[in-house]
Image (spheres, helix red, strand yellow):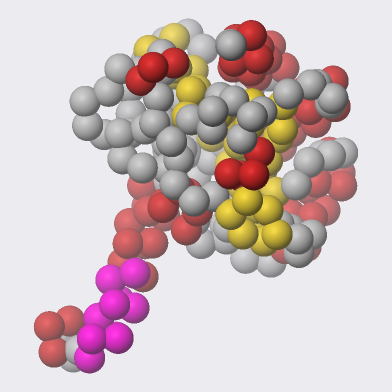
Amino acid sequence: MSLSRAPRRTRRTLVAVGMLSVAALTLSACGGDDNGKSGGGGNTNFVTNPGGGISTVAKGERGAPGKLAGETLEGKQLDVADLKGKVVVLNVWGSWCGPCRAEAPHFAKVSKDLKGQDVEFVGINTRDFNKQPAIAFEEDYGVPYPSLYDPQGKLILFGFPKGTLNPQGIPSTVVLDKEGKIAARSLMALDEKKLRSMIEPLLKEK
């Protein structure tokens, strides 16, 4: 049956599946860096450090993310919008991803070091169609913060509007400023130094 002849409900389902399939292809597994190029589509004012693979946006030019809310790996509800007023570090990861395993100890350490400051860490776990490996990953690396469970990548697809610093690989890290706007992004595995370099300037902003 062709798409044009399919019932309306079926067409909507097929279109949604198609969009998620495209997103899965676009979001490269265990992606590298962005080679100094800006991403996200459209005319942007991103500034990228070619050596560090970290892109930033000036304070007055930042865009807001879409809805980033849902169930965590532990089965609790979490809405990133509720964290406004703090710097929010969003890390896209999967238990199957080698670079994610490499950066996990750094994220665990920095998140513990910054506990009590105006910073919140939230993972976005994707492509783990069974929660158990992802939960075991968090336990193995002592990850102290929650992760939204996004096995099909819906939050990644719809949560970061075109023209913003959006995740384009796994792992990816996006940092929101205290106003809840997208301020920085990395498309590579981060060590402690690079992770702190994304967070600390935003903590100092008034």
Vertical position of residue 124 compared to residue 20: above or below: above
Q: Is residue 21 left or right of residue 11?
A: right
Location of residue 108 by image quarter = top right
Location of residue 60 by image quarter = top left
- Magenta stretch encompasses residue 71: no
Vertical position of residue 118 compared to residue 5: above or below: above
Q: Residue at x 70, y 49 (%)?
A: 147
Q: Residue at x 78, y 41 (%)?
A: 145
Location of residue 47 by image quarter = top left
The prevailing secondary structure element of the residues shown in magenta is helix
Query: What segment carries the magenta color?
Result: 7-16
Residue farthest to the left, as pictured:
4
Name the foreground residue: 53 vs 80. 80
Q: Position of residue 202 (x, y in %)?
A: 59, 15
Let me know if residue 88 appears in the view.
yes
Q: Position of residue 158 (x, y in %)?
A: 41, 52
Q: Position of residue 151 (x, y in %)?
A: 57, 60
- Magenta stretch encompasses residue 13: yes
